[in-house]
Amino acid sequence: MRIASVEDDPSQAAQIRQLLEEAGFTCTSFATGSDFLRALRDQVFDLLVIDWQLPDMSGYEVVNWVRQHAGRLPPILFLTSRIDESDIVAGLAVGADDYLAKPVRPAEFVARVRALLRRAYPAVPHDDQLLRQGRYVVDARRRSITLSGAPVELSPREFDLALFLFRNIGRLLSREVIEQAVWGRAMEAGSRTLDTHISRLRIKLEMRPDNGVRLMSVYSHGYRFEEASTLAAGQPDA
């Protein structure tokens, strides 16, 4: 599991990193909120540990940005030296999953991290981790997809969308259902975010009948991801 720590105090950042790495996690430290948000452009983390008081922006702003752009995952644990109830409520209301008062108590800190990870990523049956459809193999645990044995490079969000489609093959999925599942929220009216990601998946995964699948748009509703063999012969792609 990869964890990001956003903490500007060097000694506390080192302590957090040491505790997490000793517990078997990979931890990357960021000294400012802006450094962390830039890293999110091309890095994926399974859990975030965010200090509530940062030099360039508040932890509140960081958590709010993450929830607006990444949805309900990853889980967020915020650390604070301010224990007023109003501050704690504000942090949880904006999207943090748990909080811990400073100074960090090592055993409790690691226990909170493990509890958040268990809740966010519950164990699933092995059969649900490895999906086979047509010429595709989707490995949910390794977050990888192969087509005819060759790996396909996808962004983290593209993989989340592809995994959701493969897990719901044959179902008519509304735009709102897909957006809530993948982004954690419904997009604003007129947003092309979902359509852009769908278009990229069509190209990268070569979604066509000779590979065993077909992704169809359903006017004014959403999408249906189908086994190619279940569709009427000659029906055009959307």
Image (cartoon, helix red, strand yellow):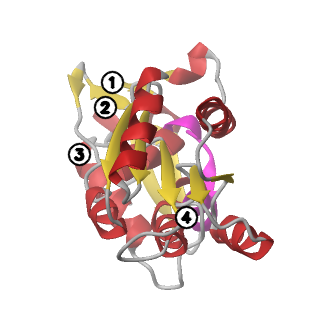
Location of the C terminus by quadrant is: bottom left
User: According to the image, label 4 marks what residue?
Assistant: 222
For marks 4 and 2 on the same chain, the one whose residue lies earlier in the sequence: 2
Q: Residue flagged by tag 2: what amino acid is it? A: Asn
Find numbered disc 1 in the image and state the secondary structure of the residue it sits on. loop
Q: CA distance from mark 4 to mark 1?
A: 24 Å
Q: Position of residue 97 (x, y in %)?
A: 67, 54
User: According to the image, label 1 marks what residue?
Assistant: 135
Labels 1, 3: front one:
3
User: According to the image, label 2 marks what residue?
Assistant: 211
Q: Is residue 104 visible?
A: yes
Which mark is drawn over residue 27?
none
Which mark is drawn over residue 204?
3
The answer to whether mark 1 and mark 2 are in CB contact below 8 A is yes
Labels 4, 3: front one:
3
Q: Residue furthest bottom?
A: 190
Q: CA distance from mark 4 to mark 3?
A: 20 Å
Q: Residue flagged by tag 4: what amino acid is it? A: Gly
Q: Which residues are magenta?
A: 166-180
